Amino acid sequence: MGAEYARQRLRFRPKKIKNNRYRLPATGLPVTSSFRYQQLENQLLDAINSQRLRNGERLPSVRSLCQQHQVSKATVLHALQRLEAQGLIEARPRSGFYVTQRLPALNTPQATALQLSPGPVTIPDLLLDIMQRGAAFDLVSADARLTDTTTGVVTLNRSISRALRRARGDSAQYYDEPAGLAALREQIALRLAQRGYAASAADLCITVGCQNALFLALMASCEAGDAVAVESPGFYGALQLLQQLNLKVVEIPSSALSGMDMDALADALSRWPIKACIVSPAYSTPAGALMPAAARQRLMALAAQYDLAIIEDDIYADTAFTRIPDPLKAEDPDGRVILCSSFSKTLSRDLRLGWIAGGRWHERIVQLKLVTQLASGRALQQGVADYLADGSYSSHLRRQHYRLRQQRDQLMEQLQRWPVAVNLSQPQGGLTLWAELPANTDTHALYSTALAQGIVITPGPLFSASGHYRHCLRFSFAHEWTAARQQALTTLGELLAAAGAKP
Amino acid sequence: MGAEYARQRLRFRPKKIKNNRYRLPATGLPVTSSFRYQQLENQLLDAINSQRLRNGERLPSVRSLCQQHQVSKATVLHALQRLEAQGLIEARPRSGFYVTQRLPALNTPQATALQLSPGPVTIPDLLLDIMQRGAAFDLVSADARLTDTTTGVVTLNRSISRALRRARGDSAQYYDEPAGLAALREQIALRLAQRGYAASAADLCITVGCQNALFLALMASCEAGDAVAVESPGFYGALQLLQQLNLKVVEIPSSALSGMDMDALADALSRWPIKACIVSPAYSTPAGALMPAAARQRLMALAAQYDLAIIEDDIYADTAFTRIPDPLKAEDPDGRVILCSSFSKTLSRDLRLGWIAGGRWHERIVQLKLVTQLASGRALQQGVADYLADGSYSSHLRRQHYRLRQQRDQLMEQLQRWPVAVNLSQPQGGLTLWAELPANTDTHALYSTALAQGIVITPGPLFSASGHYRHCLRFSFAHEWTAARQQALTTLGELLAAAGAKP
């Protein structure tokens, strides 16, 4: 409760609070009894579901909710935060809370159409080409970009420079310890503890970004030929890893709202031997789904029943527009969750620093890191540790959340004005949303047409091991909606309309 | 010839020449005809071998050699350089050239005793412990170290800071291209071209140090269960990689003078299917051997005959006290050599930047890098590229060569005064030498005894897949011989004498 409360206060007060000043109370147990905030939450939930509170409607003010329900301001704020985290309501600065605008529901992928039996991953060359462009997050190609000076990153780079200056020649003669710089692991552990996972520095290993963490997780927990369950649509980087490591894939349908379908997973587990499951409970790419508490509990129960390794891709958690969700790793008594993350989506893709909490595979992971790359750079890690410790990262995240939500709104507005019909996911975090276009759309063909006009799109089949989602696109709202990007989006709509995608 | 000559001039003139100012002529063909410098070289070689020029004797001056043999100064210098590169003579500043002091020959390992048939690698926990300490290059433990400010590294860190400042927020939103920053690859290609390998940036991929390059090379060229030939004694990092990737090892005996024994390799190749060979032709660890031209040619012929992948560990080449040897990759018409290297041994272990020239496996390697780590940090690469381009790296190497040779001499002198008999290799480059102690020495037992006194040693069995070389130690001369290190070395000798190692 203490940390939860501290986070709330933090969010509602713009005053800068040093990240390492508040700590979890000694007991990090989850709260299960029925508190006043839960009763209020349920009442508001009822009002939204029954449409007594309608789409886009403003909620009563915090003060009037206090009076109406005879509870404290803290209790009201707690309940509102929880509804916000579920994407049901949205805070608008200096105005209050509103019921989130709901678009028509997206179709959940049909389980029958997917590669539900274990098979190899085959990725067409076109998709490798897209990956190699490294531009999958931006609509415009490198030459059309504006110089984008991000305050947080300038501060970060200063922090790294200071660490380099302090290092002098000192660190040049020795390798860092394989698990990574203790100071950085401590800072990351502190942030994880605030999310209910009472990690210590000794549980963590620093990696070359999250992709490297996923690689180490698979190397440690699987052997060639093993089957691994993944979200579908899901992260292409995971699919490529499975392909390169000769692992088999089982695609589990995932909804744009609530992530991996637990019925489908249970079904797959009862049929085939599956060794591991890669899952991204917080704002998974492409749709930005947030896995509800019930699904998370069911996943952990299935994992225990079938002795699964759970590889948790936590990379988007810190992009949460409101409350950062707790990781699966917070409910992992058996050490079977391997949490993987990095600073790439929140701070800088150029840092190449990630982390892994390997649970029962921790020692094997550190050894694998040692033999595949020896160590990480100490000065770089020290710079990032300092940046975390002085609260710069927390300030940066607050600025970023506001910016990301605005950019998401701008993207959705423009897409809804397109000359073709489009169903959109409505992520409450992450950097991307998922768009279903008319069924006859061929985004593969569109890729080349668009590229000829300098527009880089991310076709749906990139997110499947078996070529599905040809009529879907992933859109990113990671970038500012400059005139060039808006124009690119308009042109893309026209190209689709011209290609005969029926509205 | 042009580049060779330019290098000579460079070495004999202390004036700073910008690294990117002189280039290879269009034809990079090796010179095979008998030039005047070769005749002179052979005559001097005869004189040394027949002991007309004795151990430690000063050679005639350059001027008198010119007169005596009626050749130009350039020809004399060229011949002397070549003898120096073979470790037969040594230049002493402001004094002239001397015949290198020869110690009693080291025993070449007995082929019969080694794991000459393919088998798994088993590494005892003790050795993993040593590796994990990351201190295998230093005799003293972290708390006994002095702050060591290396001018070259301070300059490097400044260069990286400048690149970070220039990057502002710019690079934070995009990943670098998978092969790495073009500017850095161009600088590395330029250096390789000066060593007879006409590489272009497109042939190279940036990695997380040399260990990561070796990992990518093995992943690309081998499959689990394949057999790989390695030097014995040889690099433990390679052995650990074979173990983790489930590859089999064949240990090929290697001499402390001339590296891998080609007769033994030919024998092994005729008996078993071997997929790849990891070899370090230039100053291999532990002994610092330099592979002679004839052995290199034979290796390439065997590789062609048995369709071997040659994984060339080139990491110590730039530590050459005199002329930097050409890589095997310079004589690789079939693209079967995968050259692996990094800046860790010359510049900074903390950079975590290496490179790989993958030959026919290049594309697969870039793809493997992409899926296992996405990309490298751009600002860091730009900083190093600038440091190379402005000649700072070349100046740093010149200072370092002088320092390394002095440190090697100090180490050898102190070891020869030890109370136990010790046979030493006499490396002309690298950072380490190999010491054979009396046959009854148990360096495993010594490890714990020494550690209790704060002394970290590197026992011989670390360099074998099958526990050989228990009576051997690797010594590093990478560090300044401070009083603490001298004392550690003295204590170590006393411990050995006390343990009953017979003199």
Image (spheres, coloured by chain):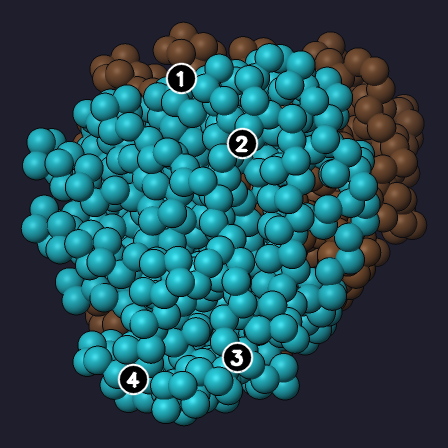
Chain colours: A brown, B cyan
Q: Quadrant of the N terminus of chain B?
A: bottom left
Measure the C-alpha gap from mark 4 to mark 1. 72 Å
Q: Name the element at disc 1.
A: loop
Foreground mark, 2 or 1, reads 2
Mark 1 Cα-neighbour bin, 10 Å: few <14, some 14–19, many ≥20: many
Mark 4 Cα-neighbour bin, 10 Å: few <14, some 14–19, many ≥20: some
Measure the C-alpha gap from mark 3 to mark 2. 34 Å
Tag of residue B422: 2
Q: Quadrant of the C terminus of chain B?
A: top right
Relative to B107, residue B309 above or below: below
Q: Name the element at disc 4.
A: helix
Q: Residue at x 32, y 89 (%)?
A: B25
Relative to B244, residue B404 above or below: below
Name the amino acid type tagged 3.
Ser
Q: Nearer the viewer, residue B70 or A103?
A: B70
Mark 2 Cα-neighbour bin, 10 Å: few <14, some 14–19, many ≥20: some
Measure the C-alpha gap from mark 2 to mark 1. 54 Å
Dot 4: chain letter:
B
Q: Which residue is mark 4?
A: B36
Q: Which residue is mark 3?
A: B61
Tag of residue A308: 1
Mark 3 Cα-neighbour bin, 10 Å: few <14, some 14–19, many ≥20: few
The answer to whether any part of residue A12 appears in the image is: no
Query: From the viewer's perspective, is A141 left or right of A340?
Result: left
The answer to whether any part of residue B427 appears in the image is: yes
Name the amino acid type tagged 2.
Val
Q: Residue at x 65, y 68 (%)?
A: B399
